[in-house]
Image (tube, rainbow, N blue to C red):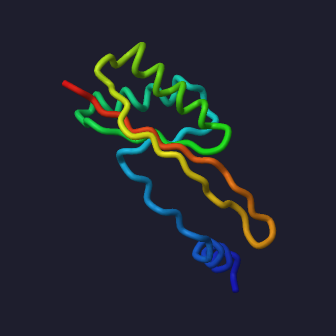
Amino acid sequence: MTETNVKSKQINDKKTRTQIPRDSVFIGSKPIMSYVTAVMMYFSGGMNELSVKARGNAISRAVDVVEVSRRRFLDNLTVGDITIGTDVLGEGGDTRNVSTMEINLKKSD
């Protein structure tokens, strides 16, 4: 096999990611204001509902994002359902439980 055939075969063997829903913001390790900006952009685009999702150590950052968005920028945001859960990560004997949280936001007129 040539080198290009090997590279394309490796790419094809990778697991494909699931599609990210349009009405979700996943919180990670970026600064809080990056996520607040994403929330503001989403609601300024005419949408009325949004889910802020986080897991592990990012859960407290997700709560901060929601509170900063609500109190400083978008007064008409209300918190809807809050869902907590656990994801099992890892394979075989190397599995661990990671806490998850989803906060649903709604824009009232």
- Write the residue at 47% across / 22% down: 67
The image shows residue 23, relative to residue 77, as above or below, that is below
Which of 85 and 42 lies nearest the eye of the viewer? Answer: 85
Which of 33 and 64 lies nearest the eye of the viewer? Answer: 64
How far across and down, in percent of the image, does residue 71 sit?
41, 15
Figure quadrant of the N terminus: bottom right
How far across and down, in percent of the image, does residue 84 sit?
53, 46
Which of 70 and 38 lies nearest the eye of the viewer? Answer: 70
- Write the residue at 32% across / 25% down: 77
How far across and down, in percent of the image, does residue 43 sit?
30, 31
Extreme residue in the top direction: 72
How far across and down, in percent of the image, does residue 54 sit?
55, 42
Which of 16 and 100 lies nearest the eye of the viewer? Answer: 100
- Write the residue at 46% across / 27% down: 66
The image shows residue 54, relative to residue 76, as above or below, that is below
Dividing the picture into quadrants, the one containing residue 9 is bottom right
Figure quadrant of the C terminus: top left
- Write the residue at 37% across / 31% down: 79
Extreme residue in the right direction: 93
Relative side of 32 to 77, left or right: right
Dividing the picture into quadrants, the one containing residue 91 is bottom right
Extreme residue in the left direction: 109
Extreme residue in the bottom direction: 1
Relative side of 83 to 3, left or right: left
Relative side of 106 to 15, left or right: left
